[in-house]
Structures are given as structure tokens and as C-alpha cells.
Image (cartoon, grey):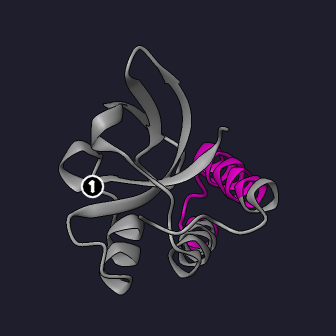
Amino acid sequence: MYPQFCTFPAHLGRGDRYLDAVAVDFGLGSFRPSVMLSEQNNMVEVITAVDGRTTALPVTQVRRGLNEGAALALMDALEEAIEDTLEAEPLDAARLARLEETLSLLERCLADEGAPPTEP
């Protein structure tokens, strides 16, 4: 069941310009695209920044699923963040590693699901 694409309310996240841009491009309004990692005690661990930082959010606040275009755009945003990190001086190797791990996770989500589920 996990990881799984989702959206979460922007005000519960970390304020990530890459996630913000995908939300604007795909009309997600006050929600941001992401991936749920696990669920426990009515809380869901959600990636709230492209570098893989997570936040535990109430399960009632997270929407399961993400349309295919937004899921692919999320992957593109991660690739852009990787490029931006590679161009930065000095190179932040730890950030780069986190970004690459997050991109791998998204690729696994796509492979596991065949295609991202659509939003309800």
C-alpha cells in the first residue's frame, strides 16, 4: 500500500517552491503533491519537501491519489531541484543525496502502481 501518491494541505507542509509550482500548474489549489510513506495511529507520514523531509499529518488531512500529469510533474520538479543543487556553489552533497533518494521513491511509486491513481 505504501508508498503512495497523495496531496496534503499546503499550510501543514514546509513551504517548498518546487511543490508549490506543481500545485499551481495542475490547479491543486491549497494542496501540494506528495507521497505517503506510512500510516500509524491515524497519522500519515508524508514527504513535505522535495529533499525528502517528512511530516506526520492526520490521515483526515491527506488525500490519496494524484493525477498522472501532476505525478510526472512532481518527478520533473525533483529533477529540476537536482540540477539546481548540482549548479550551486558549494555543492551540497547531502541535499543532492536526499533529492536522488526522493526521486527513486517516486519512480518506485510509479512502477508499483503502474500509473498513479487519479484524484477522487
Q: Is residue 28 above or below residue 11?
A: below
- Residue 15 is left or right of residue 40, and the answer is left
**Residue type at mark 1?**
Gly
Tell me, yes or no, whether the highlighted magenta stretch contains residue 85.
Answer: yes
> Who's the residue at 61% across and 76% down the image?
72
Percent position of residue 42, x then y = 37, 21
- Residue 94 is left or right of residue 13, and the answer is right
State which quarter of the image contains the N terminus: top right
Residue at mark 1: 15
In front of the other: 107 or 44: 44
Secondary element at image label 1: loop
Percent position of residue 109, x then y = 71, 54
Examine the image and state in which quarter residue 115 appears. bottom right
The residue stretch that appears in magenta: 84-109
Single out the residue that lies furthest toward the top: 41
Q: Residues within 10 Å of mark 1 (few under 14, many from 20)?
A: few
In front of the other: 45 or 115: 115
Examine the image and state in which quarter residue 91 appears. bottom right
Tell me, yes or no, whether the highlighted magenta stretch contains residue 106.
Answer: yes
Single out the residue that lies furthest toward the front: 120
State which quarter of the image contains the C terminus: bottom left
Q: Is residue 22 above or below residue 59?
A: below
Q: Main secondary structure of the magenta part?
A: helix
- Residue 41 is left or right of residue 113, and the answer is left
Q: Is residue 82 above or below residue 9?
A: below
- Residue 3 is left or right of residue 90, and the answer is right
Examine the image and state in which quarter residue 79 appears. bottom right
Percent position of residue 43, x then y = 38, 24
Count of residue discs: 1
> Who's the residue at 58% across and 67% down the image?
78
